[in-house]
Amino acid sequence: MIYKLSDNIISSLGFTTAANYKAVLEGKSGIAPGKDAAGNPIAISRIEPEIVEESFRNTFKTKEKYTIPEQAMLLSAHIAMKEAGIQAGSERTCFVLSSTKGNIHLLGLPTHGFGQDRVHLWHTAGLLAGFFGNPNTPFTVSNACISGACAQIAAIQLLEQGRYDHVVVTGMDLAPDFIVSGFQSFKSLDEERCRPFDARRKGLNLGEAAATIVYGKEKKKGISLIRGSIRNDANHISGPSRTGEGLYRALQTAMDGIPAHDIAFISAHGTATPYNDQMEAIAFSRAGLQSSPVFSLKALFGHTLGAAGILESIIAVKALEQGLVLPSTGYEEPGIEGDITISTALSKTDKRYCLKTLSGFGGCNAVLLFENTL
Amino acid sequence: MKKITAYCRITDRQVILNGKEPDIAFSGEPGSSRLTEIYRYLDAGYPKFHKMDNLSKAGFLASEMVLRALDYDRETPDGSTSVVFANKSASLDDDKRFQATINPDNYYPSPSVFVYTLPNIVTGEVAIRNKIHGETSFFILEDFDAEKMHTFIEWAFSSPGINRVLCGWTEYLDNHCDVLVMMVEKESPKGMDYNILNINQLYLN
């Protein structure tokens, strides 16, 4: 078990966790109409690059050049570490990066001038640790859409090994043409704001974000990450299992010993693609979670890929701390086979545990179990 | 005691399975055609192979050889095995191919190229082929690092019910292949001692 010291979210809804959480409570969505590079309409949650650059300049006053994804990542880590009051440069601090595509936009800019290593994720992670003067080789997880959960599971391992006192887990993914056109080719984007778990859901929205959680091993009140589990569907590389096999197995392992009626809510993956949401419902139902309220944050932030597991964990545990269950924005009409409870309005809870689930290409699924200690 | 019970190394120079070179007649230059030659040698009868990108093909072939050498039962769903791979270049080999197809005239390229722009797809391919329901994870490192690989294997073993970890370094970029896949088993009477030194030795071979 590890303990959350601080966090940060950088998204279209704000550059602090407080701003993002406030927007969530007010039901504000960062998803806005946009266009893809071919001029077709899309709905997407974009971070304004100019605001990132301005914020970065004002915060760091460096002459070095950094890409926008790097700037967002560094800002997020900086804000979270400052709040935690930890020593970033200490050998007892370790960094974990979660990203699916990092600086991939550089592939489309042959004359970017950043050097050929810059597109590599190991370089991005090295830059994250190096920027803050940290001497340890950082860890990099790239496990599709579940990366943010995998990075937090890595943090449990790193802290329990005893070699580190603090682990900084940062997730980052933007939505360059590379990613937008890929999801377009899959026909998995909704032109309008997405509707997770709704009968009319027809696809996802992409979102841009960087998000950070600083974990420590010193016991403290507040949010702790008890354990996590990763399991595979062994079914299809780009389609979820019809039986929810991998997610069901991950739920079983993560919940071990915690009865379903003690779970305040499930912050689901809920991408709003027809198959994903149905698969999740089957897995939740199989795991005995029929009565646990389920919500998705994708209609507020979009799918933020490698940042999603961290961003959505932060929002979920904020709600848990305040004894709140968030509504699943975009859901109106039941459209899922299976017995689950979608959260339709903000409500109160006095339960201590919550689950964060994620599923991704490659058939991978991850579940995190959080506790709020009073 | 944990043991390394089988391993396979695929490089531009050679293929090694448990210390021996299988008798594969290579006709061409290193690269994707060699991977096809290994596939033919294995006579795997798995047409999905031809849809894979080079990274997945390379990881798949090495895994296939390791699991065959162990008489692995691929028909029974297996919740006790995990697949943990790592590499340097993630899916950059396929990323470049995908990037080359994005242009204003053809903005929506093939989804079958896009899906391989994630490095962990190879772990999914191996899981599907062998009905493996344990963990699948993918890590990125600047270079092969036996100590880090050992760390990843230990993490995978710490999850309840996991008795075997199929672990590997699966690097493929611009026709260069650098793959080591090994099986580490929790309780095995035979096999090589599982330690950082031996993992490094297998890679250097």
Image (cartoon, coloured by chain):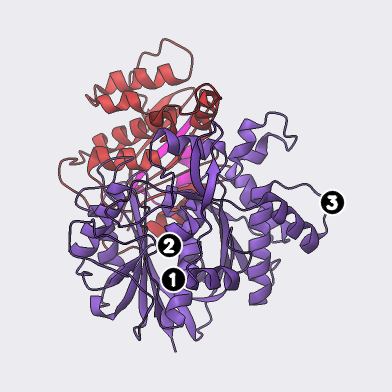
Number of labels in the image equals 3
Secondary structure at badge 3 equals loop
Q: Amino acid at mark 2?
A: Leu
Instruction: Tell me if residue B26 comes above or below residue A65 in the rendering.
Output: above
Q: Nearer the viewer, mark 1 or mark 3?
A: 1
Instruction: Tell me if residue A143 comes above or below residue A253 in the rendering.
Output: above
How many C-alpha atoms fall within 10 Å of the one at disc 2: few (<14), some, or many (≥20)? many
How many C-alpha atoms fall within 10 Å of the one at disc 3: few (<14), some, or many (≥20)? few
Chain of the residue displaying label 1: A
From the viewer's side, name the closer residue of A6 and A108. A108
Q: Quadrant of residue A52?
A: bottom right
Q: Magenta includes B131?
A: no
Question: Residue at label 1?
Answer: A316
Q: CA distance from mark 3 to mark 2?
A: 37 Å
Residue that appears at 53% across and 58% down: A30
Question: Residue at label 2?
Answer: A297
Tell me if A64 is positioned left or right of A255 in this view. right
Chain of the residue displaying label 3: A
Question: Residue at label 3?
Answer: A63
Q: CA distance from mark 2 to mark 1?
A: 9 Å
Circle 2/circle 1 CB separation < 8 Å: yes
Instruction: Tell me if residue B138 comes above or below residue A311 in the rendering.
Output: above
Q: Amino acid at mark 1?
A: Ala
Secondary structure at badge 1 equals helix
Q: Colour of chain B?
A: red
From the viewer's side, name the closer residue of A31 and A185. A31
Q: CA distance from mark 1 to mark 3?
A: 37 Å
